[in-house]
Image: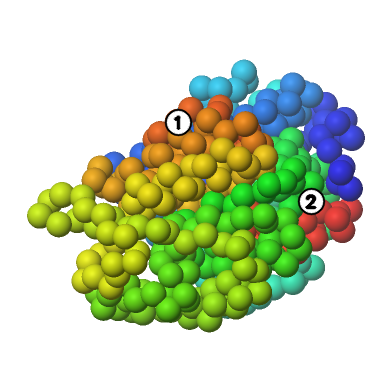
């Protein structure tokens, strides 16, 4: 790695500022955490720093302006961390104000404190980032950096899942504090490089879900550099591929796609199908609901005035065979609306095929991990990436703000 790691510094008696990403899926009714994957993945780095007798200050976010329903305090996060950490984890619902500063000064060796949700600060929300567009050097004057930097001796970033964010907590502290990369971030980058730099062929990408900008964000990169031997599409991505082939879905589903502005991807889909023949598979059949029952229709019988929300049995059979033959597998997005029992078949069977495969498998993205957790033991996956947007940008060949900041660290 080109970055300094935790073992490159002596933290005993020093105050270490650790940025993690423990942003977790929340039940919108109870406001409780429903998936602890990112929390559990952060444990190793936290414990290692504490074992070095550091005074540990942990900063993290939950929710954002774009998903306000998830913007809640980090109290439950602190409670869950405490269950896994062999040390005292304090919590204060203040990200960097006078109360937080006082608690930091009172830390003893081997103790940690989780500060309040960073999204409480305007300078840490995506709306601010998109509107103000500060450069990293300008972030040294932000409230967060001015408040915490003077109290800390070192900065460690272990938040690869937020690596696409150009915010003070992610890219500013590196300019003024000795900086190290956390263990999780190292593993994340190594897993991504296994897919992007050294995949054992055949390398199969399984791309589904409703957020098709992610799929199309990486598709051209993995096709043009030859990393992907085959792309299996499902969800809206698969339907866009069908439309790109001139296959009409039906007015109802086509209007659904158009109303959400997703028809803009049809032109790209046509381009990829022409330039990379045989590299992209689209569904052979689709599932819909009729009279409270699951029905399936072969693509050759389209169009039909139905809302398709899963792939069918024929598609699953073909995709499962391709997955079984793969030596490297990357997955982003479920095959259908798996939350509905009638339409979990495609997603469940694809996951079963991936778990049974002998290939090296990597999955990523919040909804992807949640879906996988429902149908299999995540231990059956070689690497579960905590990242979503950062992962997509990394696999798309784009430079991440965090990576740039870590390269240029003090």
Query: In the rendered image, is residue 78 in sight?
Result: no
Q: Quarter-wise, where is residue 401 in the image?
A: bottom right
Q: Position of residue 327 (x, y in %)?
A: 67, 40
Query: In the rendered image, is residue 359 in sight?
Result: yes
Residue at coordinates 47% horizontally, 76% vertically from top-left? 244
Q: Position of residue 346 (x, y in %)?
A: 37, 46
Q: Is residue 398 above or below residue 9?
A: below
- Callout 2: 10 Å neighbours few (<14), some, many (20+)? few
Q: Is residue 43 left or right of residue 374?
A: right
Q: Is residue 308 left or right of residue 359?
A: left
Q: Are marks 1 and 2 in contact (CB under 8 Å)?
A: no
Quadrant into which the N terminus falls: top right
Q: Is residue 217 left or right of residue 318?
A: right
Q: Position of residue 22 (x, y in %)?
A: 55, 42
Residue at coordinates 66% horizontally, 37% vertically from top-left? 360
Question: What is the C-alpha distance between the residues marked 1 and 2?
Answer: 28 Å
- Give residue 376's mark: 1
Nearer-the-camera pick, 130 or 230: 230
- Give residue 197's mark: 2
């Amino acid at each position: 790695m080109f970055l300094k790691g935790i073992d490159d510094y002596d933290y005993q008696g020093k105050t270490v500022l650790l940025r993690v990403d423990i942003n977790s899926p929340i039940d919108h009714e109870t406001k409780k955490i429903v998936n602890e994957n990112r929390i559990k993945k952060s444990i190793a780095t936290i414990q290692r720093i504490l074992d070095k007798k550091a005074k540990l200050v942990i900063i993290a976010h939950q929710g954002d302006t774009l998903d306000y329903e998830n913007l809640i305090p980090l109290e439950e996060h602190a409670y869950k961390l405490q269950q896994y950490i062999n040390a005292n984890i304090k919590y204060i619902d203040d990200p960097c104000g006078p109360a937080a500063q006082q608690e930091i000064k009172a830390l003893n060796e081997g103790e940690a404190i989780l500060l309040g949700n960073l999204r409480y600060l305007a300078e840490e929300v995506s709306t601010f980032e998109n509107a103000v567009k500060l450069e990293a050097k300008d972030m040294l004057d932000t409230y967060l950096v001015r408040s915490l930097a003077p109290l800390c001796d070192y900065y460690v970033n272990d938040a690869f899942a937020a690596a696409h964010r150009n915010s003070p907590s992610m890219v500013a502290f590196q300019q003024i504090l000795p900086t190290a990369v956390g263990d999780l971030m190292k593993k994340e980058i190594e897993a991504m490089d296994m897919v992007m730099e050294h995949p054992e062929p055949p390398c199969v990408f399984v791309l589904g879900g409703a957020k098709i900008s992610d799929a199309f964000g990486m598709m051209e990169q993995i096709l043009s550099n030859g990393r992907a031997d085959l792309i299996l599409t499902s969800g809206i991505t698969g339907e866009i591929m069908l439309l790109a082939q001139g296959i009409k879905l039906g007015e109802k589903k086509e209007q659904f796609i158009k109303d959400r502005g997703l028809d803009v991807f049809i032109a790209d889909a046509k381009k990829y199908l022409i330039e990379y023949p045989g590299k992209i598979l689209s569904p052979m059949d689709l599932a819909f609901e009729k009279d409270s029952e699951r029905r399936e229709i072969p693509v050759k019988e389209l169009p039909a005035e139905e809302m398709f929300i899963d792939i069918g049995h024929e598609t699953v059979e073909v995709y499962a065979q391709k997955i079984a033959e793969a030596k490297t597998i990357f997955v982003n997005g479920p095959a259908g609306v798996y939350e509905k029992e009638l339409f979990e078949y495609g997603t469940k069977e694809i996951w079963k095929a991936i778990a049974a495969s002998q290939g090296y498998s990597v999955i990523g993205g919040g909804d992807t991990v949640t879906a996988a957790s429902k149908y299999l033991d995540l231990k059956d996956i070689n690497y579960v990436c905590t990242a979503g947007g950062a992962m997509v940008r990394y696999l798309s060949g784009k430079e991440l703000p965090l990576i740039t900041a870590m390269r240029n660290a003090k």
